[in-house]
Image (cartoon, rainbow, N blue to C red):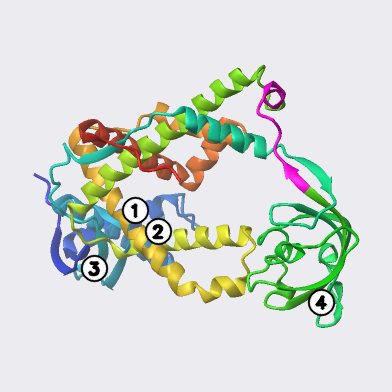
């Protein structure tokens, strides 16, 4: 049997942390020096010598630093590979190499500071309990949905009476802030400064919070001064937290009327008749309920399995996932118009939320990997191609280009992990002990 010339000892530094001390004997160090020097000698070109025939000592002196670097790199790789073969650690993240001692005639010594996957006993995952709510769609559900559709196609009738909540006001307005036109405070906010024949619902939330409800009681031709408080997270940062004063003239008062639920309404939604619209609504509601029911069962069995296991998690993976979630939270809130100041004020809460979610995700990852290994669940090439094709269709780009890009930047492994998790949860649901339960009361 070939002698390895490598000795490895292991220290536990804490949960999921190992320190591997590696020592490579002097004989192997010298052998690698001879091997690397010979390769340089073969390629070297010196005046007065034929290619590859320069004396070894001359080559070693000329390329001393380069030879040492290559020897060191080769020995590090050999030592690391041997350490992994001997101890079979599942290293996560990028290990750190420390304490290198590298002198000719002496053993080469270095340490590998690494995080490893947690070790745990997989509990019983078959027969996890879950409740399945009744998913039948009633005639009342269909009628509510039809009325909601009708509300989206309203008619507006001009009325001579005073405005009341739920009406629509047609107004002319001018706005000021700190006694000046709003555009002097926020130059791009022309629409907040002046408008003619502007339609605004008489309610508490439309346009600017609190604006519409102050129009209640006005009649066509009336004038009124109202004030609003621009929210601290207002979409126009220059106005955030300030007061606005508006001079209002009511041009028309309009009552919002839902259209009749009939064949004409059906046609506006592309259905041949009311009966066809009703059938489509029922099918859509049933699909929605089925999807919600399936999602609920999947969440239940996943949570039940996670609750059964307490494991330590690699800090680097949790930190990495936390940062990814924080980025998504900040991005989503920015897209909704939240200002940097508002986001900064909630930094601590965002971090706590993100870290808790990251811990659950990382924990689920290791548990799902264990279940997949035990049950022989695999992600095949066809699974990856199908998922990438779906992404490509959504973003209207060529599937082969997206596949190459994702392979190049490492995103394919994320897709594979996602598919594997879905397959494992499919299996957990298949094994689950599902009990039927009455549906929760509808709001």
In primary-sequence order, the first of circles 2 and 3 is 3
> Is 358 above or below relative to 224?
above
CB of mark 2 within 8 Å of CB of mark 1? yes
What is the C-alpha distance between the residues marked 4 and 2? 41 Å
**The magenta segment:** 255-267
Q: What is the CA distance from the residue labelled 2 to the residue labelled 3?
A: 27 Å
Mark 1 secondary-structure assignment = helix
Determine which of the numbered discs, if any, sits on residue 185 in the image. 4
- Specify whether residue 259 is in view: yes
Q: Residue at x 17, y 41 (%)?
A: 125
- SS class of the residue under badge 3? strand
Secondary-structure class at tag 2: helix
- The quarter holding residue 391 reads top right
Looking at the image, residue 299 lies above or below residue 231: above
The location of residue 118, given as percent across then percent down, is: 21, 56
Q: How many marks?
A: 4
Answer few, some or many: residues within 10 Å of disc 4's Cα (few below 14, many 20 plus, some between 14 and 19): some
Q: Nearer the viewer, mark 4 or mark 2?
A: 4
Q: Of tags 4 and 3, which is closer to the observer?
A: 4
Image position, residue 82 (x, y; %)? 19, 53
Farthest residue, direction bottom? 178
Q: Earlier in the sequence, mark 2 or mark 1?
A: 2
Residue position marked by numbered label 1 in the rendering? 361
The quarter of the picture where residue 24 lies is bottom left
Say which label, 4 or 1, has the lower sequence index.
4
Q: Write down the residue under mark 3.
A: 111
The label shown at residue 321 is 2
- Give the spatial CA distance, label 4 vs label 1: 45 Å
Lateral position of residue 345 relative to residue 232, left or right: left
View extreme (front): residue: 161
């Amino acid at each position: 049997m070939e002698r390895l010339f490598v000795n490895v000892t292991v220290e536990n530094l804490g949960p999921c942390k190992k320190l591997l001390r590696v020592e490579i004997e002097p004989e192997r160090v010298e052998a690698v020096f001879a091997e690397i020097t010979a390769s340089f000698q073969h390629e070297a070109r010196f005046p007065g010598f034929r290619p590859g025939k320069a004396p070894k000592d001359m080559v070693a002196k000329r390329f001393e630093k380069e030879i040492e670097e290559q020897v060191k790199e080769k020995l590090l790789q050999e030592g690391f590979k041997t350490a992994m073969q001997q101890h079979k650690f599942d290293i996560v993240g990028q290990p750190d190499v420390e304490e290198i001692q590298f002198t000719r005639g002496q053993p080469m010594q270095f340490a590998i500071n690494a995080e490893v996957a947690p070790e745990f006993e997989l509990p019983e995952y078959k027969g996890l309990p879950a409740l399945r709510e009744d998913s039948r769609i009633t005639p009342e559900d269909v009628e509510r949905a039809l009325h909601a559709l009708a509300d989206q196609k309203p008619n507006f009738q001009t009325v001579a009476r005073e405005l009341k909540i739920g009406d629509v006001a047609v107004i002319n307005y001018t706005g000021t802030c700190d006694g000046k036109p709003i555009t002097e405070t926020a130059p791009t906010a022309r629409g907040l400064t002046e408008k003619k024949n502007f339609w605004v619902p008489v309610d508490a939330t439309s346009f600017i919070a609190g604006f519409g409800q102050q129009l209640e009681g006005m009649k066509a031709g009336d004038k009124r001064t109202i004030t609003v408080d621009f929210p601290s997270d207002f979409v126009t940062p220059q106005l955030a937290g300030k007061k606005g004063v508006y001079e209002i003239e009511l041009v028309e008062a309009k009552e919002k009327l839902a259209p009749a639920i009939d064949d004409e309404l059906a046609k506006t939604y592309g259905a041949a008749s009311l009966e066809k619209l009703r059938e489509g609504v029922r099918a859509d509601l049933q699909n929605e309920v089925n999807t919600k029911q399936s999602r609920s069962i999947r969440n239940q069995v996943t949570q039940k399995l996670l609750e059964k296991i307490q494991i330590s998690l690699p800090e680097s993976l949790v930190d990495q996932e936390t940062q990814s979630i924080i980025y998504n939270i900040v991005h989503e809130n920015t897209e909704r118009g939240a200002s940097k100041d508002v986001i900064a004020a909630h930094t601590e809460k965002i971090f706590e939320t993100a870290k808790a979610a990251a811990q659950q995700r990382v924990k689920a990852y290791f548990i799902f990997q264990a279940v997949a290994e035990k049950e022989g669940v695999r992600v095949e090439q066809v699974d990856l191609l199908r998922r990438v094709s779906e992404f490509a269709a959504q973003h209207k780009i060529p599937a082969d280009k997206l596949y190459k890009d994702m392979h190049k930047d490492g995103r394919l492994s994320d897709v594979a992990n996602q598919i594997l998790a879905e397959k494992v949860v499919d299996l957990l649901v298949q094994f689950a002990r599902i009990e039927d339960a009455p549906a929760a009361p509808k709001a």
